[in-house]
Amino acid sequence: MGNKKLQVWLPLLFALVMIAGMFLGYRLGNRGKGNGFFAGDQRSSLQEALDLIRLKYVDSVQLDSLEGKAIEEMMSELDPHSVYLPPVDLKEANEDLAGNFQGIGVEFNIFNDTVNLVFVIPGGPSEKAGLKTGDKLIRANDSVLTGRGFDAEGVKKYIRGPADLR
């Protein structure tokens, strides 16, 4: 008779223990998404170092520049095609990739403080105006484009504009 009661209650007891274990495991594993009983510390050593500098370093520090330098150093250890673009450079890089600008239709290099045209895009505004490969740009509107103060980015500001600007 005792064996008959055990056959009825034992599967029910196992089912209850299994349900309680599943519920307990779910609650412990999802507590705070990463802060659970079984979850390890998910923070990287780089993040810990930045937090220590922010909280305990004696002088004020620009954390953005520290993070940027750390990321650049990490990227230098990867292949030569991986590169980090800081947020200030991202807008210009996206503009170059998207092509949401229009210029005079040339490619140029700066030699001896002078803008030299190395390619004139066929059918572009510069070809229609009579510019040729090898020409030198001296002025753009009222701005002088010669001298030591210019780099490629500075010249682009003078010869580019938004697309369909009339």
Image: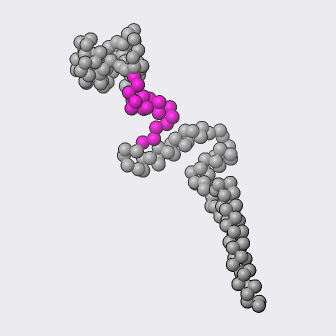
Q: Is residue 77 above or below residue 155?
A: below
In depth, the one of 69 and 88 nearer the eye is 88
Question: Residue at (47%, 33%) from the top-left corner?
Answer: 90
Q: How is the image coloured?
A: one colour
For the N terminus, give its image quadrant.
Answer: bottom right
In depth, the one of 132 and 57 nearer the eye is 132
Q: Is residue 146 above or below residue 152?
A: above
Q: Quadrant of residue 36?
A: bottom right
Q: Is residue 24 above or below residue 12?
A: above
Residue 12 location (% of width, % of height): 71, 76
Q: Quadrant of residue 57?
A: top right
Magenta region, main secondary structure: helix
Range covered by the magenta-colored residues = 83-101
Q: Is residue 59 above or below residue 127?
A: below
In depth, the one of 126 and 156 nearer the eye is 126
Left or right of 13, for residue 88: left
Question: Residue at (55%, 42%) from the top-left corner?
Answer: 66
In depth, the one of 101 and 16 nearer the eye is 16
Is 42 in the magenta?
Answer: no
Residue 43 location (% of width, % of height): 60, 54
How many numbered tags mark residues here? 0
Residue 92 location (% of width, % of height): 44, 29
Asked if residue 155 shows in the view, the reply is no
Question: Residue at (25%, 16%) from the top-left corner?
Answer: 127
Q: Quadrant of residue 2?
A: bottom right
